[in-house]
Image (cartoon, rainbow, N blue to C red):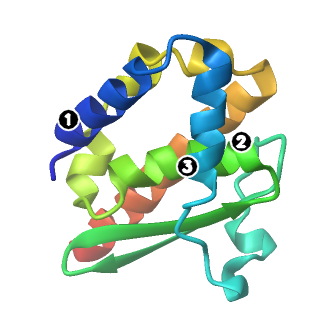
Amino acid sequence: MAIPEIEAQIISEFSLFEDWMDKYTYLIEMGKTLPLIDEKYKTNQYVITGCQSQVWLFAEQKEGRIIFSADSDAIITKGIVNLLIRVLSNQTPEDIIEAKLEFINTIGLREHLSPTRSNGLTSMIKQMKLYAMAFKLKAG
């Protein structure tokens, strides 16, 4: 599925909730379904800097598409990274690099995060795009 289609699904899902406490609850539920990183990647090499909580992110390329897995020590952060993985995992490096991720502002996520969590969100996106750039350069 293309990135804009996945973003539209997420926007639709979040529109079902009227207040942000329900949306946070939904994010927490999403955190519980996060495709977890293999324990061997829970090292400093895979930690995303700039996050308030510990977040580990691993990427691998299979058949030209990047597959992400992650973990965090904070449940709300797990939900946030799972949203990003849902949109960006299994996409080509080019699509990840070009993704605008407008769903983040459309659902109001950034404005409802604390400044430190918002910085963490930006750091997660940056790291995912850096992985995509690295795989693109490696491919040629």
Where disc 1 sits, the SS reads helix
Residue sitting at 77 percent across and 42 percent down? 51
Q: Could you say whether the residue bearing mark 3 is in a helix, strand or loop?
A: helix
Residue topped by disc 1: 4
Q: Rounded to the nearest whole Å, what is the CA distance between mark 3 and mark 1?
A: 19 Å
* Residue under the image location 31 percent in, 49 percent down: 96
Task: Give the number of marks.
Answer: 3
Q: Position of residue 46 (x, y in %)?
A: 68, 68
Q: Amino acid at mark 1?
A: Pro
User: What distance separates the C-alpha of mark 1 from that of mark 2?
Assistant: 24 Å
The disc at residue 42 is none
Above or below, 86 against 101 in this view is below
**Which residue occupies the foreground of this view, 25 or 95?**
25
Sequence-wise first label, 3 or 2: 3
Q: Find the distance from the CA under tag 3 to the CA under tag 2.
A: 9 Å
The answer to whether residue 101 is above or below residue 111 is below
Residue at 71%, 84% (x, y): give it.
39
Name the mark nearer the viewer: 3 or 1. Answer: 3
Question: Which class describes the residues within 10 Å of circle 3: few (<14), some (14-19), or many (20+)?
Answer: some
Position of residue 135 measured from the top left corner of the image (x, y, whole percent): 34, 69
Q: Residues within 10 Å of mark 1 (few under 14, many from 20)?
A: some
Secondary structure under badge 2?
helix
Tell me which amino acid carries mark 3: Met
Query: Image quadrant of residue 119?
Result: top right
Of the image marks 1 and 2, the number of the one nearer the N terminus = 1
- Which numbered tag is attached to residue 30? 3
- Disc 2 marks a residue whose amino acid type is Ile
Q: Could you tell me which residue is drawn at 84 percent across and 40 percent down?
A: 52
Tell me if label 1 and label 2 are in contact, CB under 8 Å. Answer: no
Q: Which residue is mark 2?
A: 76
Closer to the camera in the image, 49 or 22: 22
